Amino acid sequence: MVRNVQDYQHLLGRLRSVMPAIATDGGLADTQAFPQRSARMFSHVTVGTNDMAASRRFYDALFTAIGGRAGVFDDEGKLVYIKDGRMFMVIPPIDGEAACHANGGTIGFALADPQAVHAWQEAGVAHGGTAVEDPAGVRHKAGRQLYLAYLRDPDGNKLCAVHVMG
């Protein structure tokens, strides 16, 4: 579990031993990737899976479509992705029960432009995901113009790609 900067640095050290190139991904070699007082709300997101192989194919495709790297397994069997100084993990449920999606929950990925949103959704659908909601496109929400696309991963977790249009 990542609770502080020291835990984060320890995990990065373990991951670097598996994938040394991770030190060059978004400045992760320094503590600025996980500052003491971050302007970002979340340090990491975790989803459960019942089929790690299917999840790996799906999330490897999503992350590479948006300029990230394929995931790596840590020594506890967690599939870890790091992009822009933040961590996304896929795990079998710790309690031994079946993984299930959060009814009403959505995990959003902030992307650079509408083309990245399309690439993200296309990669997801091609690797076991399902497009849901309206087709990718412009939405007006909370006084902002957003470009959105939605997917469900192979375990039913709802994901969203969003580009704020200004």
Image (tube, grey):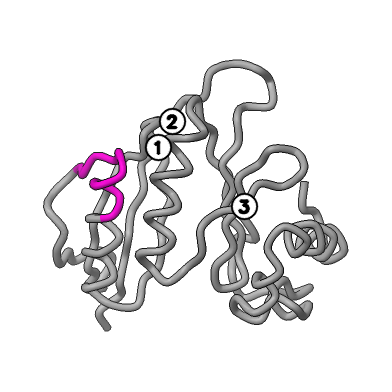
Q: Is residue 23 left or right of residue 53?
A: right
In reply to whether residue 130 is colored magenta, the answer given is yes
Q: Front-most of 20 and 156?
A: 20
Residue 102, by quadrant, is top left
- Distance between mark 1 and mark 3 Cα atoms: 20 Å
Residue at 65% x, 60% y is 43
Report if the CB atoms under discs 1 and 2 are less than 8 Å apart: yes
- Residue 101's label in the rendered image is 2
| Residue beneath disc 1 | 157
Q: Is residue 97 left or right of residue 148?
A: right
Q: Position of residue 28 (x, y in %)?
A: 69, 75
Residue at 38% x, 68% y is 66
Q: From which residue to which does the magenta span run?
A: 123-132
Element type at marker 3? strand
Amino acid type assigned to the residue bearing label 2 in the image: His
Element type at marker 1? loop
Q: Earlier in the sequence, mark 1 or mark 2?
A: 2
Amino acid type assigned to the residue bearing label 3 in the image: Val
Amino acid type assigned to the residue bearing label 1 in the image: Asn
Q: Position of residue 147 (x, y in %)?
A: 22, 68
Q: Earlier in the sequence, mark 1 or mark 3?
A: 3
Q: Position of residue 104 (x, y in %)?
A: 37, 36
